[in-house]
Image (cartoon, rainbow, N blue to C red):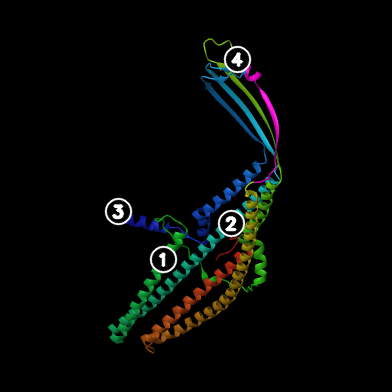
Amino acid sequence: MIVIFSIVCTVDTVAQIKKWTLEDCIGYAVVNNLNLKRQMLQTENAEANFLKSKMDMLPSLNFGSNANLGFGRSIDPVTNLITFKQNISNSYSLNSNFQLFTGFNALNTISANKFLLKAGIEAEKVARNTLVVEILGQYYQVLYAKGLENVSKQQLELSEKQYYRIVKMVETGKEALSRQMEIESQVSSDKLDYTIARNTANQALTTLKQMLQLDPGTEFEIALPELDNLLLKENKYETDSVFRIASQTLPRLKTIEYELQAAEKQISAAQGYITPGLTVGASVYTGYYKVLSEDAVEQTSFTTQLKNNNSQAVYVSLRIPLFNNYTVGRNIKTAKLRKTDAAIRLELEKNSLYTEIENACLNYSRGRDEFIAAKSNFEFNKKSFSVVEKKFESGLVDVTDYSAAVTTLSRAEAEALRTTLQLRIREIIIQFYTTGTYENISFI
């Protein structure tokens, strides 16, 4: 009874293992990938810098207080005379200042940080899309490995089918023992191919699991889609048309464009320190003083002293830069170099993107031709194998010819699978170029 219960539990556990679709893998990776989370932290840091630059436009306000216990020679703040009596003093101050003019440095800094925040958001999209493409490639690699495993399994089953048939015929004296040995050798070879294909598929699945950063003990299996129903679309992609759309939508270009705009504002912000700066401020001060010796005369109360000692002040501060050890000049030059570098990176990225799109369009066209040829070749080999199989069962062809036919059929099926997956991946890559994101893309 215990054994039966254990078997039932095991079957239930296996049945409950989730089969991950490609959308499941992408959705999980986008939420849980650690590298993507680090990129998101950089975006939050850019957001904090943007907020800080806006807060710098507001006046500052600071409160201060200090207490002092005096011994020996000191100044009596009430009489302003020298005293040697022990005393205690306490003061309070409230200060505020506002940068009235700084050569528009603050405004340009706000604009620069705003563009850097936008660049960070686009960089986050780039990291997300890169992760999706990596998951996509590995998922299709698993599908291909699983497909080869299935092809090898079918080849083994065909060999075993003929092996059992010939064994029966040998037992009845209708076939020679040598014919059984030949087919047995073929079965052994097919078992080796199937073992290798199964191990390769398991390794591909493990690699995908590692890319998703799942816990080591997590059960993981993917859902196998129906690839036979893949529709062949009459798509013809033109490089210039795809590039024109991609240059307006891809976050990888927007990231550098925002960095370039930020660099322009940083130049203006650095140049702001060349002009005079004007700061206005105000302060309020009050204090308390008490002599601690026994012969001290009666002193005014704490509250009264704070009221009587109250003083206020306003001030205006003018800063005219004359010489600052080339600090401002260096900052301006650095900002200009940063802008030039961003402009060069943008051109390099555009050139690289155009090359990638051109190759993607050519690869799609070639892949489509290969897909049609491989599909036709597979259909032809299925018919051809059916004829050879019947002849083999009738004794009209030997084991060598039969094995060659099985191998040819398996290769044709594997090639049809490869070109099918390859064509779909290349189509999705072009969709990425034209949309700039993975949402609303049909992966299968």
Q: Is residue 346 above or below residue 403?
A: above
User: Of the numbered discs in the image, which one, if any, rests on residue 127?
Assistant: none
User: Where does the magenta region start and end?
Assistant: 300-323
Q: Is residue 366 left or right of residue 196?
A: right
Residue placed at 36% from the left, 85% from the top? 399
Type of the residue with mark 4: Ser
Q: Residues within 10 Å of mark 4 (few under 14, many from 20)?
A: few
Mark sitting earlier along the chain (1/4): 1
Question: Can the viewer see residue 266 in this picture?
Answer: yes
Type of the residue with mark 2: Ala
Which one is in front in this view, the residue at disc 3 or the one at disc 1?
1
Mark sitting earlier along the chain (3/1): 3
Q: In this view, does 92 lie to the left or right of 405?
A: right
Q: Residues within 10 Å of mark 3 (few under 14, many from 20)?
A: few
Q: Is residue 361 above or below residue 50?
A: below
State the residue position of label 2: 123
Q: In which quarter of the image is the C terminus?
A: bottom right
State the residue position of label 4: 301
State the residue position of label 1: 203
